[in-house]
C-alpha cells in the first residue's frame, strides 16, 4: 500500500472515500447481476460430488458381492468334484460301512452346494437392488451435470460481458484505496462489510443519511457541510458527507468509471 508523504485535509479524505465508494458500488452492481448463479453452480457441484461418492460406494459393494459369488461358485465346483470322486469310490467299496461313510460325505457336499447356492441367490438379490439404486443415482447425476453445464454457461456469459469493466474497476478501486490512509481505509472496509448494500459513505437525503429514516440534527448537518472532521452516523454507522460533495464527486467520477 502506498504511503502518504504529506498530510491531506479531512475534505480530501472525504472526497477520496466517496470516490472509492462510487467505484466499489459499481463493482457491486456488476457482481449482483450474476445474482445467485455462483452459489447455484457451487451447490450443484457439491451435490454432484456427493452423489458420485455414493455411486462409487455402490459400485464397490457390487464388486464385493460379485467376488463373494465367485467364491461360492468355487465352493460348488469343489463340492461337485468331491461328489464325483466319492461316487467313484463307492463303486469299489469292500463293505457297507465304507459305502455309508462315502454317502455321508456326498450328502455333506450336497448341503455345501445348497448353502452356497442360497448365498449366491442372496448376493444376486443385493446386486439387483444396488444396481437399481446405482442406475437412479447415475441418471440423477447426468441430469444435474446437464443442469450444471447450462448454469455454468449462463454464469460464464455474464462474467464475459462485464469482465473487462470489472477488471478495470478493480484496478481503479486499488488505485483510489492507496490514496487513503490505512486506518481510515480499514474503517471504510469494515463498514462496507457490515452494510447490506455495501455503502460505507453516504450523503444526506432530506436531512437523513441515504437509506436511513433517522434525521440528522441541523447542527450536525452544518458540521458535515464544513468537512472539518470525519462524522459517523450514530444509527447506521456510515460515514456522512454533504450533498454538494456527493454531486461534485459523482460528476467527476463519471469519466473515471466510464467504460
Image (cartoon, grey):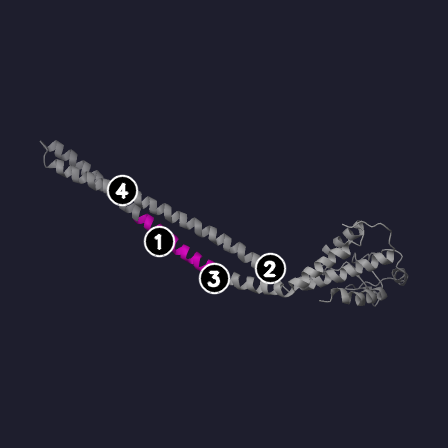
Alpha carbons under labels 2 and 3: distance apart: 19 Å
110 and 14: which is toward the camera: 14
Label 4: how many Cα within 10 Å (few below 14, some 14–19, many 20+): few
Task: Judge left or right: residue 46 versus residue 88.
Answer: right
The residue that mark 3 highlights is 143
User: In this rendering, is residue 196 above or below 99?
Assistant: below
Alpha carbons under labels 4 and 2: distance apart: 54 Å
Label 3: how many Cα within 10 Å (few below 14, some 14–19, many 20+): few
Chain-order first, disc 2 or disc 1: 2
User: Does the CB distance between marks 3 and 1 fall below 8 Å?
Assistant: no
User: Does the CB distance between marks 4 and 2 fall below 8 Å?
Assistant: no
Chain-order first, disc 2 or disc 3: 2
Residue 259 falls in which quadrant of the image?
bottom right
User: In this rendering, is residue 153 above or below 134?
Assistant: below
Q: Is residue 204 visible?
A: no
Alpha carbons under labels 3 and 4: distance apart: 41 Å
The residue range painted magenta reads: 121-144
The residue that mark 2 highlights is 38
10 and 224: which is toward the camera: 10
Chain-order first, disc 4 or disc 2: 2
Instruction: Kindly state the secondary structure of the residue where label 3 is placed.
Output: helix
Chain-order first, disc 3 or disc 1: 1
Chain-order first, disc 3 or disc 4: 4
The residue that mark 1 highlights is 128
Alpha carbons under labels 2 and 1: distance apart: 39 Å
User: Residue drawn at (76%, 62%), measured in percent from left and top?
Assistant: 22
Label 2: how many Cα within 10 Å (few below 14, some 14–19, many 20+): some
Residue 128, given in percent of the width and then of the height, sits at: 35, 53
Instruction: Kindly state the secondary structure of the residue where label 4 is placed.
Output: helix
The residue that mark 4 highlights is 74
Instruction: Kindly state the secondary structure of the residue where label 1 is placed.
Output: helix
Label 1: how many Cα within 10 Å (few below 14, some 14–19, many 20+): few
Amino acid at each position: 500500500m502506498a504511503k502518504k508523504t504529506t498530510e491531506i485535509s479531512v475534505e480530501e479524505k472525504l472526497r477520496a472515500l466517496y470516490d472509492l465508494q462510487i467505484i466499489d458500488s459499481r463493482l457491486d452492481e456488476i457482481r449482483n447481476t450474476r445474482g445467485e448463479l455462483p452459489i447455484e453452480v457451487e451447490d450443484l457441484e457439491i451435490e454432484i460430488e456427493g452423489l458420485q461418492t455414493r455411486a462409487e460406494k455402490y459400485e464397490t459393494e457390487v464388486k464385493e458381492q460379485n467376488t463373494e459369488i465367485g467364491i461360492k461358485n468355487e465352493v460348488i465346483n469343489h463340492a461337485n468334484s468331491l461328489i464325483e470322486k466319492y461316487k467313484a469310490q463307492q463303486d469299489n467299496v469292500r463293505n457297507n460301512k465304507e459305502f455309508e461313510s462315502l454317502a455321508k460325505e456326498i450328502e455333506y457336499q450336497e448341503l455345501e452346494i445348497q448353502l452356497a447356492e442360497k448365498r449366491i441367490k442372496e448376493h444376486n438379490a443385493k446386486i439387483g437392488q444396488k444396481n437399481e439404486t446405482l442406475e437412479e443415482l447415475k441418471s440423477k447425476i447426468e441430469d444435474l451435470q446437464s443442469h450444471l453445464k447450462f448454469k455454468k454457461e449462463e454464469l460464464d456469459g455474464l462474467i464475459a460481458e462485464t469482465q473487462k469493466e470489472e477488471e478495470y474497476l478493480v484496478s481503479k478501486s486499488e488505485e483510489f484505496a492507496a490514496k487513503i490512509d490505512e486506518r481510515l481505509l480499514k474503517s471504510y472496509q469494515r463498514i462496507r462489510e457490515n452494510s447490506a448494500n455495501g455503502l460505507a459513505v453516504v450523503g444526506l437525503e432530506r436531512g437523513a443519511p441515504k437509506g436511513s429514516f433517522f434525521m440528522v440534527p441541523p447542527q450536525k448537518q452544518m458540521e458535515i457541510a464544513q468537512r472539518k472532521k470525519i462524522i459517523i452516523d450514530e444509527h447506521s454507522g456510515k460515514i456522512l458527507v454533504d450533498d454538494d460533495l456527493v454531486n461534485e464527486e459523482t460528476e467527476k467520477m463519471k469519466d473515471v468509471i466510464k467504460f
